[in-house]
Amino acid sequence: MFPQKGETVPKIRFKGFEGEWVITKAAEIFKTVNERNFSGLPVLSATQDKGMVTRESIGYNIFHDKANESTYKHIRPGQFVMHLRSFQGGFAHSAIEGICSPAYTIMEFKDKEVNHDLYWKYVLASKHFIKSLEMITYGIRDGRTISFDEFKEMVFLVPKVEEQQHIASYFTSLDKQIALQTQRLEKLRQIKAACLDKMFV
């Protein structure tokens, strides 16, 4: 579904798509944004598996001075966040609007017409991408975060937006199925526990 090293065409591909993927530097795809003074919006945190979420939703109610919220960075749906754990979980995609720590770096597409955020959500959280980050994160363990200046030199193979949308739809569908099966499994565990409690009184 993605081209192998040294190739520009994936071996496994959805029907109807052809042609080479384009070798593109991150600097040609992304730019940083730095909007502030959006006090009152929910405070978001980066997670490794759910992207950007509200602090409240994960029980992360760390105290912060609301007077400082004007310095927090504004995040819009479809943007991406570089955070302190990016070297472990990639960049966090945001599906919601909010504000976040000034320590985060916010990115968005230079051209939204040729880039699909849900496709890049999977690319920027993939094992391949995280492994690639190792090349530019040599200072992480000394407390230094990934910088956009380092990231922008990375190279990607990019399909046309229509193919991006198709790939994103496929992975989104898989995620929904996984979530559904996880819920069913948890329900079965609860039923089993209840039965055991009644059987061995």
Image (cartoon, grey):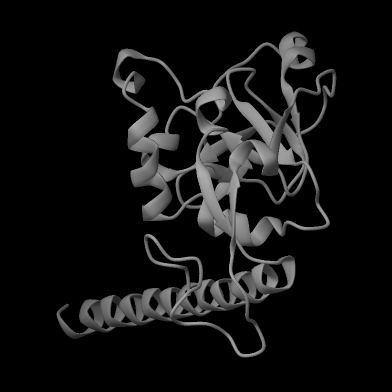
How many numbered callouts?
A: 0
Question: Which of the pair 78/129 is nearer the observer?
Answer: 129
Residue at the image position 76 percent from the left and 22 percent from the top: 34
Question: Which of the pair 57/86 is nearer the observer?
Answer: 86
Q: Position of residue 96 (x, y in %)?
A: 73, 47
Residue at the image position 39 percent from the left and 66 percent from the top: 4
Q: Is residue 89 above or below residue 173?
A: above
Q: Is residue 4 above or below residue 110?
A: below
Judge left or right: residue 89 versus residue 27.
left
Q: Position of residue 172 (x, y in %)?
A: 59, 71
Query: Can see residue 56?
Result: no
Judge left or right: residue 112 versus residue 95.
right
Q: Pick out the residue farthest to the bottom.
A: 15
Question: Which of the pair 121/11 is nearer the observer?
Answer: 11
Q: Is residue 153 above or below residue 69?
A: below
Judge left or right: residue 93 versus residue 111.
left
Q: Position of residue 43 (x, y in %)?
A: 68, 31
Q: Quadrant of the C terminus?
A: bottom left
Query: Can see residue 169?
Result: yes
Q: Position of residue 16 (x, y in %)?
A: 67, 88
Looking at the rendering, which quadrant does residue 30 occupy? top right
Looking at the rendering, which quadrant does residue 171 occupy? bottom right
Q: Is residue 11 above or below residue 59?
A: below
